[in-house]
Image (spheres, helix red, strand yellow):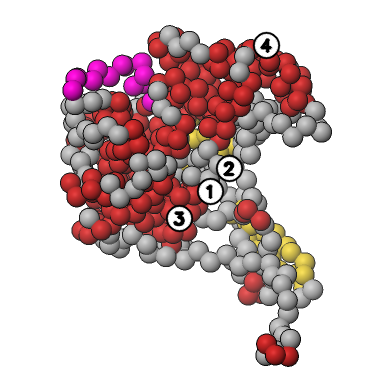
Amino acid sequence: MSTSATITTSKGNLELPVHSGTVGPDVIDIRKLYGATDMFTYDPGFTSTASCESKITYIDGDQGVLLHRGYPIEQLAEHSNFMEVAYLLLRGELPSKDEYEKFVHTISRHTMVHEQLAMFYRGFRRDAHPMAIMCGVVGALSAFYHDSTDINDPYQRMVASHRMIAKIPTIAAMAYKYSVGQPFLYPDNSLSYTGNFMRMTFGVPAEPYVVDPIVEKAMDRIFILHADHEQNASTSTVRLAGSSGANPFACIAAGIACLWGPAHGGANEAALNMLREIGRPERIKEYVAKAKDKNDPFRLMGFGHRVYKNYDPRAKVMQKTAAEVLERLNVKDPIFDVARELEQIALSDDYFVEKKLYPNVDFYSGIILSAIGFPTTMFTVLFALALTVGWIAQRNEMIEDPNQKIGRPPHHYTGAAQRDYVPVEKR
């Protein structure tokens, strides 16, 4: 049943069509608004504007729901693996056994990077932030793989997708190795996608590296939980860059640059730094009181979410994973005791419950990654690795969308009106 919305302006009434999605709120189609009324809508941050149509990811923040192609994130994290989720995001359906094996084989045969690309790393200072290296190296891939940059060729789009997904763990591991002065390790295609990354990151040529299955599963879950999250800032950036016809590697580099922002990909680092500031369990009550004090600028990091007004479904999975990793590694660090106690307070204290300030995915992920051995500078790199799959799926969907146009949002101008130029000697 088609419906419409009526908007009343100084030029009269305008009927605008209303479209319904599979689930979620209806949308008012305002594409004819400017032409009919000479008016724009004003929506800073696009918090009430759907910028595109998508079939990939759905979020219901009020109910705490996250679906990838219709599948709940909890089920995927529990029963699937990152390669299967990657196939699902790219192709729209879970793979058959033969499709899955072929996909994994294809990805594993693209894991090596061009040998000259290793020389690219040596142009960075040794203390360069790994995300700075990621931006530069990923953007440079278009200089090495000319045969997969034509966005209008479906085959080249597929090859570029496979290459990017396969090479991003290698590039990320090399960024870490370069920062600590250790030699790069070539991929080992006998390992899983995640196991291969762990080995390239923490292994050394002098001795064999044994992948811990508990840690490997934890990392794989982290990748699944961060594979796509609707039209967040970095995904929107990838789509916007792609709308101009930019090559796939440039689009992913743009997404990485956006993700680097502390308000986006750096939230878990902020949460971990907060735990370190608290330091000891006996100081928790002091900091909880500070968080409740409206006149105190201190805020508990890793609690609440802009989208989720209920328990972040990813956090439930991460909570379980954190317990498994800490038990497996037998890590002795007071900040983990702080995290456990702070978590219990947040889940039972009326102040946090009423304000729906549940621990979010960033609260747990920083704890897990630190326990595994990743420095905080690598946290956002790991999310870029996982999000690459979602970015690629979103960009490919945009290219195939017949309604796609180059992104060109207007703005609400409040500057000076037209005025005449005055020569400098008369000013």
Q: Are marks 3 and 2 in contact (CB under 8 Å)?
A: no
Q: Are marks 1 and 4 in contact (CB under 8 Å)?
A: no
Which residue in the protein does label 2 denote?
Answer: 263
Which residue in the protein does label 3 denote?
Answer: 239
Which residue in the protein does label 1 denote?
Answer: 233
Specify the label residue 282 is tagged with: 4
Instruction: Tell me if residue 306 can be seen.
Output: yes
Tell me which amino acid carries mark 3.
Arg
State the residue at coordinates (42%, 34%): 378
Tell me which amino acid carries mark 1.
Ala
Q: From the viewer's perspective, is 7 left or right of 374?
A: right
Q: CA distance from mark 3 to mark 1?
A: 10 Å
Q: Are marks 4 and 2 in contact (CB under 8 Å)?
A: no
Along the polypeptide, which appears first: circle 3 or circle 4?
Answer: 3
Q: CA distance from mark 1 to mark 4?
A: 37 Å
Along the polypeptide, which appears first: circle 4 or circle 2?
Answer: 2
- SS class, disc 1: helix
Magenta-tinted stretch: 206-219
**63 shown above or below 31:** above
Taking depth in this image into account, of 391 and 425 the one nearest to the observer is: 425
- SS class, disc 3: helix
Q: CA distance from mark 4 to mark 2?
A: 29 Å
Specify few, some or many for label 4: CA neighbours under 10 Å numbering under 14, 14-19, or 20 or more. few
Q: From the viewer's perspective, is 424 left or right of 110?
A: right
**276 shown above or below 127:** above
Q: Is residue 217 magenta?
A: yes
Along the polypeptide, which appears first: circle 1 or circle 4?
Answer: 1
